[in-house]
Image (cartoon, helix red, strand yellow):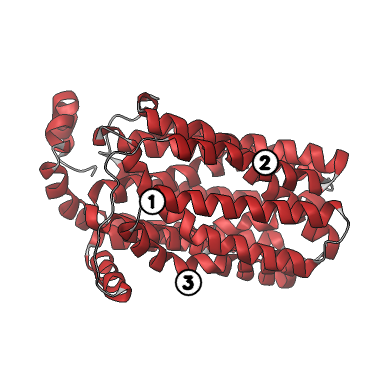
């Protein structure tokens, strides 16, 4: 389950990023609580989410080209340093009691721009930290485990700190946490950085990557389903302060517990994927996990019992993480190396880039029809998209099979589970 940690560079990044991500989740919870406390407006929660995520949709494709052209480690050092600066500014404004909503909007837009470069570069950089490409899937799953272990700890810590000392300390601790990941990046030894020296116009390379993604069915349908889930499903999290305060009549600690349960379920989902020995079967899992996520959203929208809702969020987190990490793993397995940065930028755009529109839509709908009905509608949309994806699965399998054969994935799997393949055919690519 933890075999990717045998690689020194990845091990450095894993522990450094782990510390930083706890701070990131603390800041996310503190920021949403701060905005809702200051404005008492669901729509403003949507606005802040929108401005923090819309740069990802607009800039990530260009960032993907740069991730294919330049040294990814150096790019990450720059983006992580800028993220640290943003957190320090937030902490300073809150602790000096100068914070206003427009400050939050501007700084959210700033971190959105930074993340537009950071996320696709970090995704594409994973393979450079792994000496044995066969451990790439495990490394991606462990990245997801790390994200969600921090998602479990960060909101819980933030909920307690907000109640005790306020949001400013959460922002300050997040800024300090970036030291760990910067140290890991600086001390790595990357002997063969993956970047090209192409002198073609950046938009020609962007067009090439976009054409590749649109005309290759596995990448196209994975990105479309991921984009739908991110648009209609994931933004329900921006409405969590409403559920915590108005539905369950709690405070910051209630919000922390709700988010922590989602993170706990996602952590279990990531560990489940890390324990898998092969990418075979992930295509079907992508669709089924999206169905599970949609069902849990529907059930959560009608639940009015706090304990039941926490369990539902646990299952929801499991489904969402299995869906996202499986998409990531298949994309990184089948993509051509010279287009890795661009494809991962499209992954980032589908996942994070659709969230601002979803946040804006969720905030607007919640103001008109209420948060529970908004979440119900999103869950139905996720289920419908998953069913379409499952119908396209035979086409996706037929296109992935030659790539798996070329990379030796099928023979390797055949050594262990040939009997299962013989019984069901190659039906689980």
Taking depth in this image into account, of 290 and 98 the one nearest to the observer is 98
Residue 155 x %, y %: 69, 41
* Of residues 128 and 26, the one drawn nearer to the viewer in this rendering: 128
The answer to whether residue 199 is above or below residue 185 is: below
Which quadrant is home to the N terminus?
Answer: top left
Decide: marks 1, 2 in contact (CB < 8 A)?
A: no
Rendered image: mark on residue 250:
none
Q: From the viewer's perspective, tell me whether residue 131 is left or right of residue 183.
A: left
For disc 2, the marked residue is 176
Q: Quadrant of residue 410?
A: top left
Mark 2, Cα crowd under 10 Å, few <14 / some 14-19 / many 20+, is some
Residue that appears at 34% across and 57% down? 70
Label 2 element class: helix
Q: Secondary structure at mark 1?
A: helix
**Number of residues whose C-alpha sits closer than 10 Å to that of mark 3, classed few (under 14), some (14–19) or many (20 or more):** some
Residue occupied by mark 1: 72
Could you give the CA–CA distance between mark 2 and mark 3, rounded to whole angstroms?
29 Å
Q: CA distance from mark 1 to mark 2?
A: 23 Å
Q: Is residue 312 visible?
A: no
Q: Where is mark 3, residue-wise?
A: 58
Q: In the image, which is nearer the foreground, mark 3 or mark 1?
A: 1
CA–CA distance between discs 3 and 1? 20 Å
Q: Position of residue 321 (x, y in %)?
A: 48, 43
For label 3, the SS is helix
* Mark positioned earlier in the residue sequence (1 or 2): 1
Residue in the image at 16% along x and 43% along y:
404
Left or right side of 96 for 329: left
On screen, residue 333 versus residue 317, left or right, reads left
């Amino acid at each position: 389950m933890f075999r990717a940690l045998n690689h020194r560079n990845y091990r450095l990044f894993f522990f450094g990023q782990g510390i930083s991500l706890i701070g990131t989740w603390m800041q996310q919870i503190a920021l949403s609580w701060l905005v809702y406390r200051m404005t008492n407006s669901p729509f403003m929660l949507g606005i802040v989410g929108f401005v923090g995520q819309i740069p990802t949709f607009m800039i990530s494709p260009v960032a993907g080209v740069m991730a294919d052209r330049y040294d990814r480690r150096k790019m990450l050092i720059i983006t992580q340093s800028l993220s640290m600066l943003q957190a320090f500014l937030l902490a300073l404004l809150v602790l000096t009691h100068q914070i206003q909503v427009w400050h939050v909007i501007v700084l959210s837009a700033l971190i959105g721009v930074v993340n537009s470069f950071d996320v696709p570069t970090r995704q594409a950089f994973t393979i450079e930290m792994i000496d044995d490409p066969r451990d790439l899937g495990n490394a991606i799953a462990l990245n997801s485990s790390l994200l969600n272990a921090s998602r479990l700890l960060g909101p819980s810590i933030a909920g307690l700190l907000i109640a005790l000392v306020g949001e400013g300390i959460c922002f300050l601790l997040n800024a300090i946490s970036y030291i760990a990941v910067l140290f890991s990046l600086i001390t790595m030894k990357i002997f063969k950085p993956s970047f090209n020296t192409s002198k073609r116009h950046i938009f020609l390379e962007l067009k090439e990557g976009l054409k590749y993604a649109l005309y290759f069915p596995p990448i196209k349908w994975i990105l479309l389903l991921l984009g739908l889930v991110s648009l209609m499903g994931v933004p329900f999290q921006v409405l969590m302060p409403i559920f915590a305060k108005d539905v369950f009549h709690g405070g910051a600690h209630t919000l922390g517990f709700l988010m922590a349960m989602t993170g706990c379920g996602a952590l279990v989902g990531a560990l489940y994927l890390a324990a898998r020995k092969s990418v075979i079967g992930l295509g079907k899992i992508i669709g089924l996990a999206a169905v599970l996520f949609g069902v849990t959203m529907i059930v959560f929208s009608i639940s009015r019992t706090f304990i039941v809702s926490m369990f539902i969020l646990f299952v929801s987190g499991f489904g969402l993480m299995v869906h996202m990490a499986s998409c990531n793993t298949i994309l990184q397995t089948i993509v051509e190396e010279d287009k890795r940065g661009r494809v991962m930028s499209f992954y980032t755009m589908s996942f994070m880039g659709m969230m601002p529109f979803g946040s804006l839509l969720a905030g607007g709908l919640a103001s008109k029809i209420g948060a529970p009905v908004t979440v119900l509608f999103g869950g139905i949309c996720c289920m419908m998209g998953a069913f379409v994806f499952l119908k396209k699965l035979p086409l996706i399998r037929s296109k992935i099979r030659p790539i798996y054969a070329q990379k030796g994935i099928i023979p390797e799997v055949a050594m262990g589970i040939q009997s299962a393949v013989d019984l069901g055919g190659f039906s689980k690519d």
